[in-house]
C-alpha cells in the first residue's frame, strides 16, 4: 500500500502526527508495532472523513477569550453554536458568547458558516479549518455545520464530555478537513415495542447517534407485545395494548406530546424519525385491544412471549383498513419526515395473494396520507409503488427489485445489534449468528446484493430488537462499540476503510464513552485507551 497524502500535505508531515486522506495507508513494509502505531496515530475520528490534513506541531488552544460566530438569521446554527458553547463550558469554566458572523475571520473565534466550500460537499458535508488562532466550519446547509461540529468535538479531549466543572486545557491539532457522507441514509432502529424505552432513553440514544453522524432513527412502535404510541381514534391501543411487554413487565407508551417532543429533539440533532407500525403480522397488541379487528370478533389475550408470525390483521374486513387509515393519518400528522414504515415481515397466517393484496392497500393508505412507504424485504413480493423503499434484512433473501426501487440495507448477520457478540454474551439473540465487533465493519454495502446496483442503495440501518433488552444499559451494551463501525460504513469512502486501522480509532473512543457514561461492551479484541 502507498501513502496517499497529497503532496501539499507531505510538507506538513512532522515527527508527531499527520493524518492522511486514507487512514489505512502505510508505506510498504512499515511494521505495525505499537511504537510505530503511536507515531502514526491518527486522530480518533469516527467516521473517518474524506480528507484529513492535521498537524500536532502547531495546536490551537480554546479558552475564555473565544466567541462563536454564526451566519446571521440561521436559527439552527444559533442553537448548534449554543450547544458547542455548552460542551466546552465546564472545561474552560466560562460560557462563551454566540453572536453574528463578523465580516472577516478574527482570532479567538469559532465561525459556523453557511457558505461556499473549496469542493462540493453536498447537503451534509462540511469544511473544517483550524489555525493556531481560530476555527472555521463551512457548509452548504446547517446539517453540514452540525457534522463539522461533531468532528471538532471528537478532536477535543474526551474529558470535555464530563459535565462536572473541572477546568482543563482544550487544545486541538491545526489543519484542514473536507468531508461528506457516502450515504444519505445513516440509520439506527430501536424496538420500543418488545420492551418500552422511555423518552429520556430515546433522547440519549439520539445524542449518541448524532455524535457519530447518524441521521435516521426508525422507531418500531408496535408489535405483538406492545403498542407504544397514542392514537386518539383508538385509545385502547395504548391503555390496553401498551400495558405490558416481553416477560410481562409494565410496558408504556408515548403520548402524542411525547412523540412530537421526540421528533423535535431528533430534528435539532439532524435526525429524522421514521415511525413503524408493523403489519399485517406482529399486530397482536392491536388485536388484543379491539375485538372488532379480529376475523372471529374475539380479542386474543395480550402476549408477552417472543414468538413471531402468529398474529395477523383480518385482511378481508373493511374495519382493518379504516383502522390503518386512522393510525397512519394520526402518526403522519406528527411526523415531518417523508417515510412511514409498514413492516410487512414474518407473516405466517396469510396466503401469498392475501399478503400481496394487503401490502398494496397499505402502501396506498400511506401514500394517501402524504408519506412514502418503507417495508421489510418481504414486501418485494407485492406490487410496489415507485416511491416504496425496501429494507433488506434476511441474509438469505434473494432480492430482485427493479433498478428504480430504492433499498436500505440492514443485513441481520452483519448489523443486527441485538445479535450476541459471542457465545458468552448474556443478552441478545443469535438466530443470525454471533456478530462480533469486526463484523459490522467488514463489508461493503455496494457489493452485498449481486442483483442490486449501488445507485439503488439509499444507505444502511442498524436495528436493535429488544426481546432480551430491558433497559438503556442493555441497549448501550449491544450498540457500543458496534454502532461506531456502522457509522463509518455509512459515512466513509469504502477505500478509506480497513479494520486493523479502525480498531485503533475505536479503542480511542473508550475515554469518551466512559465520560458519557456509556455501558459499552469492552471487547477483549480491542485495545481500549484509558
Ligand atoms: C426478526 S427483523 C424480526 C423481528 C425480531 C428480530 C430479532 C424483522 C423484520 N423481524 O421481529 O425482533 O428478528 O432479531
Image (cartoon, rainbow, N blue to C red):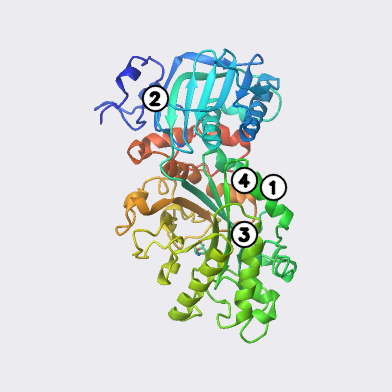
Q: Residue at x 55, y 15 (%)?
A: 104
Question: Which sits earlier in the primary sequence, circle 3 or circle 2?
Answer: 2
Residue under pointer 2:
19
Q: CA distance from mark 4 to mark 3?
A: 16 Å
Residue 359 versus residue 264 in the image, above or below: below
On-image quarter of the N terminus: top left
Q: Crowding at label 1, few (<14), some or many (≥20) Cα neighbours within 10 Å?
A: few
In which quadrant of the rendered view does residue 226 lie? bottom right
Q: Is residue 89 left or right of residue 467?
A: right
In which quadrant of the rendered view does residue 101 lie? top right
Residue 298, percent across and down?
67, 84
Eye-nearest disc, 4 or 3: 3
Q: Are marks 1 and 2 in contact (CB under 8 Å)?
A: no
Residue under pointer 1:
200
Question: Which sits earlier in the primary sequence, circle 1 or circle 2?
Answer: 2
Residue 26, percent across and down?
30, 28
Of 467 and 21, nearer the camera is 21
On-image quarter of the C terminus: top right
| SS at badge 3 | helix
Q: Which mark is residue 266?
A: 4
Q: CA distance from mark 1 to mark 4?
A: 12 Å
Q: CA distance from mark 4 to mark 2?
A: 32 Å
Q: Which mark is residue 145?
A: none
Q: Crowding at label 2, few (<14), some or many (≥20) Cα neighbours within 10 Å?
A: many
Question: Which sits earlier in the primary sequence, circle 1 or circle 4?
Answer: 1
Residue under pointer 3:
332
Eye-nearest disc, 4 or 2: 4
For disc 2, does the CB lie below 8 Å from ligand 1? Answer: no
Residue 530 visible in image: no
Amino acid at each position: 500500500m502507498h501513502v496517499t497524502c497529497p503532496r501539499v500535505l507531505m510538507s506538513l508531515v512532522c515527527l508527531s502526527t499527520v493524518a492522511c486522506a486514507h487512514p489505512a495507508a502505510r508505506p510498504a513494509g512499515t511494521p505495525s508495532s505499537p511504537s510505530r502505531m503511536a507515531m502514526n496515530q491518527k486522530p480518533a475520528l469516527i467516521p473517518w472523513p474524506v480528507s484529513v490534513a492535521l498537524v500536532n506541531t502547531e495546536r490551537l488552544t480554546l479558552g475564555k477569550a473565544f466567541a462563536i460566530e454564526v451566519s446571521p438569521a440561521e436559527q439552527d446554527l444559533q442553537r448548534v453554536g449554543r450547544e458547542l458553547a455548552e460542551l466546552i463550558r465546564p472545561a474552560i469554566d466560562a460560557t462563551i458568547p454566540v453572536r453574528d458572523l463578523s465580516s472577516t475571520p478574527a482570532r479567538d473565534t469559532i465561525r459556523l458558516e453557511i457558505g461556499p466550500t473549496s469542493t462540493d460537499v453536498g447537503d451534509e458535508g462540511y469544511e473544517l479549518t483550524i489555525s493556531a488562532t481560530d476555527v472555521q466550519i463551512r457548509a452548504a446547509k446547517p446539517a453540514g455545520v452540525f457534522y463539522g461540529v461533531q468532528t471538532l468535538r471528537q478532536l477535543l479531549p474526551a474529558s470535555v464530555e464530563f459535565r462536572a466543572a473541572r477546568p482543563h486545557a482544550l487544545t486541538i491539532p491545526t489543519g484542514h478537513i473536507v468531508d461528506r457522507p457516502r450515504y444519505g441514509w445513516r440509520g439506527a432502529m430501536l424496538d420500543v415495542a418488545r420492551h418500552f424505552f422511555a423518552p429520556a432513553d430515546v433522547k440519549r440514544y439520539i445524542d449518541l447517534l448524532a455524535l457519530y453522524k447518524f441521521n435516521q432513527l426508525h422507531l418500531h412502535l408496535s408489535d405483538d407485545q406492545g403498542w407504544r404510541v397514542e392514537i386518539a381514534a383508538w385509545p385502547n391501543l395504548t391503555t390496553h395494548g401498551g400495558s405490558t411487554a416481553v416477560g410481562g413487565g409494565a410496558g408504556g407508551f408515548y403520548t402524542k406530546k411525547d412523540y412530537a417532543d421526540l421528533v423535535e429533539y431528533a430534528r435539532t440533532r439532524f435526525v429524522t424519525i421514521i415511525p413503524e407500525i408493523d403489519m399485517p403480522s406482529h399486530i397482536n397488541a392491536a388485536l388484543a385491544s379491539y375485538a372488532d379487528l379480529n376475523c372471529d370478533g374475539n380479542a386474543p389475550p395480550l402476549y408477552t412471549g417472543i414468538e413471531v408470525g402468529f398474529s395477523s390483521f383480518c385482511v378481508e374486513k373493511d374495519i382493518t383498513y379504516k383502522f390503518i387509515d386512522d393510525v397512519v393519518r394520526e402518526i403522519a400528522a406528527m411526523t415531518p419526515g417523508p417515510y412511514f414504515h409498514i413492516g410487512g415481515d414474518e407473516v405466517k397466517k396469510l396466503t401469498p395473494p392475501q399478503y400481496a393484496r394487503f401490502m398494496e392497500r397499505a402502501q396506498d393508505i400511506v401514500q394517501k396520507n402524504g408519506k412514502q412507504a418503507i417495508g421489510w424485504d418481504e414486501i418485494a413480493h407485492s406490487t410496489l409503488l415507485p416511491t416504496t423503499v425496501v429494507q433488506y434484512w434476511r441474509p438469505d433473501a434473494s432480492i430482485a427489485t427493479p433498478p428504480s426501487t430504492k433499498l436500505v440495507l440492514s443485513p441481520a448477520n452483519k448489523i443486527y445489534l441485538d445479535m450476541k457478540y459471542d457465545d458468552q454474551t448474556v443478552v441478545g439473540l443469535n438466530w443470525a449468528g454471533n456478530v462480533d465487533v469486526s463484523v459490522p465493519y467488514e463489508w461493503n454495502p455496494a457489493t452485498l446484493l449481486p442483483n442490486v446496483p449501488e445507485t439503488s442503495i439509499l444507505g444502511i440501518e442498524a436495528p436493535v430488537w429488544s426481546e432480551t433488552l430491558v433497559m438503556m444499559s442493555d441497549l448501550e451494551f449491544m450498540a457500543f462499540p458496534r454502532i461506531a463501525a456502522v457509522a463509518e460504513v455509512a459515512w466513509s469512502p469504502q477505500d478509506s476503510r480497513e479494520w486493523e486501522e479502525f480498531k485503533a480509532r475505536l479503542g480511542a473512543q473508550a475515554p469518551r464513552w466512559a465520560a458519557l457514561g456509556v455501558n459499552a461492551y469492552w471487547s477483549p479484541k480491542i485495545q481500549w485507551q484509558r
